[in-house]
Image: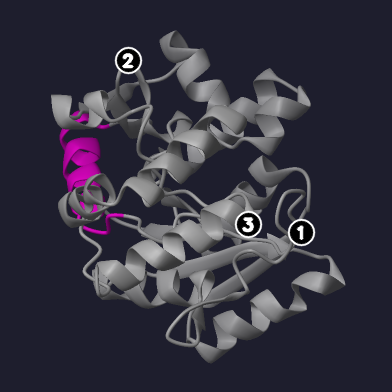
Amino acid sequence: MEKVCIIIQARSASTRLPNKILLPFWQDKNILEILVERLKKTDLPVIIATSLSTQDNIIEDIALKNSVFCYRGSENDVLQRFIDTAKYYDFENIIRVCSDNPFLDINSISELLKISSANNSDYTGYYVNNKPGIQTHFGLWPEYVTLNSLEKIVTRTNESCYHEHVTNYIYTHSLEFNISWIKLNSQFNDYDEKIRFTVDTEKDFKNMQLLISLCNNDINPDNLINVALQNQSILNTMMIQIHKNAK
């Protein structure tokens, strides 16, 4: 498969926890820096797609400091930002990553690309407990999508929800696209309402700081889940945050 890049959507503005991806998180690094460092190991081009807001200047600085690309576009129309990013750097196929997922499973990227190439997919994603992985609280999996598919969405809808949430239109209008789902085992189905690795709130942030310290930075999914299950305080916080922040 040619012309594949990783695009991380990132901005400093956040209603529930401003600057959450820029706050010191682990060993003097913030979440965005940790994520970039790990994604660079895939040997795919990494691009941070942020907004034109001056408060996101620091995000561009982080990209430059870490020798990855940066594109600045619309703050609220994230779909258009992704399209413009891919076109500017001339990429036809995208691995989409959300910057509030510090424990993203980078090994899943190769599986996404393998399935997408074999099926000539417009979109490939992980499927957990009868829903797209992106709609769960795990925060472990990226998505694959083609630039052509994103451009197709623009021609089909102006609804703000589909321009704010980049791939939502695709899996809610599945007959219009060639979609491949990677269905995960029952372990993840069983923990769907217990495990939360995404960071939206201050409680999430502190909980994930504790988790990464207990894991000693060994953040493969199995180890993360095992450590969380063995620590009732971490697990309780996860379940409370899942209840409060329904997806």
Task: Residue 130: give its label.
Answer: 2
Is residue 99 visible to us here? no
Residue located beneath label 1 in the image: 13
- Residue closest to the far front: 232
- What span is colored magenta in the figure? 105-120
The disc, 1 or 2, on the residue closer to the chain's N-terminal end is: 1
Crowd class of label 3 (few under 14; some 14 to 19; many from 20; radius 10 Å): few
Kindly indicate whether the residue at mark 2 contacts the one at mark 3 (C-beta within 8 angstroms).
no
Quarter of the image with the C terminus is top right
Residue at image coords 18%, 46%: 111
Residue located beneath label 3 in the image: 202
In the displayed structure, 182 sits above or below 138; it is: above
Q: Amino acid at mark 1?
A: Ala
In the displayed structure, 120 sits above or below 144; it is: above
For the residues carrying marks 3 and 1, which lies nearer the camera in this image?
A: 3
Q: Amino acid at mark 2?
A: Asn
Where does residue 76 sit, x and y in percent of width and height?
78, 45
> Helix, strand or loop at disc 1?
loop
Crowd class of label 2 (few under 14; some 14 to 19; many from 20; radius 10 Å): few
Q: Nearer the viewer, residue 49 or 231?
A: 231
- Residue closest to the far top: 175
